[in-house]
Amino acid sequence: MKIIAFNGSPRPGGNTEILLTEALKPLQESGHAITVFKLNNMDIKPCQDCGGCTTTGICIQKDIMQTVFDGIREADRIILASPIFFFGVSAQAKAMIDRCQAFWCEKYLLKKTIPEGPHGRKGLLLLVGGMNKEEGMNCAEGTAKAFFRTVSVPIHETLRFPGIDARGEILKHPTALKDASEAGKRLGE
């Protein structure tokens, strides 16, 4: 299977990256082809709402997102990992998601969906946030759900870890690493 993962955190070695690494381990061990997009290191222009994709389903901006679009089309599994910033996914993750407006146009205006392939399409959402409030997690999951459905991922699992803020604090959580690993294993089934 082809698996793509989006690391939406700007903090190298932070809680989001630690969780994502754990989720990917069983998938790597199973020999799946994995591509990780570190969104903070990518020059992704924001969506301009220019309407250029409404009749073709193809974004007219030419940047690194062309590689992301190809990855999304070819993927059997998609993982989105993000910290919670101001009750939502990170700006890095949101910029990538917003550029998927081209897929929205393709699916809902042009009535073309990405084929599910022989393995179907599934997703995994990993969220880590410093606050212990559900609002941030709920808002971020709403955005992620819209993203997953737009790119023809009909089902996804979500792992939420509120109250985790300091770098590496996720390592002190009693079940987080195990939860992420098990979720990765389930994703590969």
Image (spheres, rainbow, N blue to C red):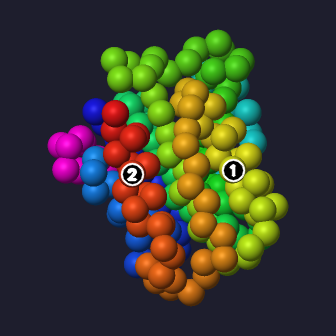
- Against 110, residue 9 (above or below) is below
Asked if residue 180 lies in the magenta stretch, the reply is no
Is 32 positioned to the left or the right of 64 in the image? left
- Against 32, residue 37 (above or below) is below
- Please tell me whether mark 1 sits on a helix, a strand or a loop: helix
Q: Position of residue 133 (x, y in %)?
A: 79, 69
Quarter of the figure with residue 132: bottom right
- Disc 1 marks a residue whose amino acid type is Glu
Q: Give the range drawn in magenta.
A: 28-37
Which of labels 2 and 1 is toward the front?
2
Q: Which of 1 and 109 is in front in this view?
A: 1
Q: Position of residue 145 (x, y in %)?
A: 66, 40
Spatial distance from mark 2 to mark 1, Cα to Cα?
A: 20 Å
Q: Which of 19 and 73 is in front in this view?
A: 19
Is 148 positioned to the left or the right of 134 in the image? left
Asked if residue 35 lies in the magenta stretch, the reply is yes
Kindly identify which numbered label has been placed on residue 189: none
Q: Residue at x 64, y 46 (%)?
A: 144
Dot 1 corresponds to which residue?
141
- Against 80, residue 41 (above or below) is below
Kindly identify which numbered label has been placed on residue 182: 2
* Image quarter in which the C terminus is found: top left
Q: Which residue is drawn at 63% across and 31% down?
A: 150
Q: Where is residue 55 in the image (x, y as percent from the top left)?
A: 67, 20
Is 151 positioned to the left or the right of 141 in the image? left
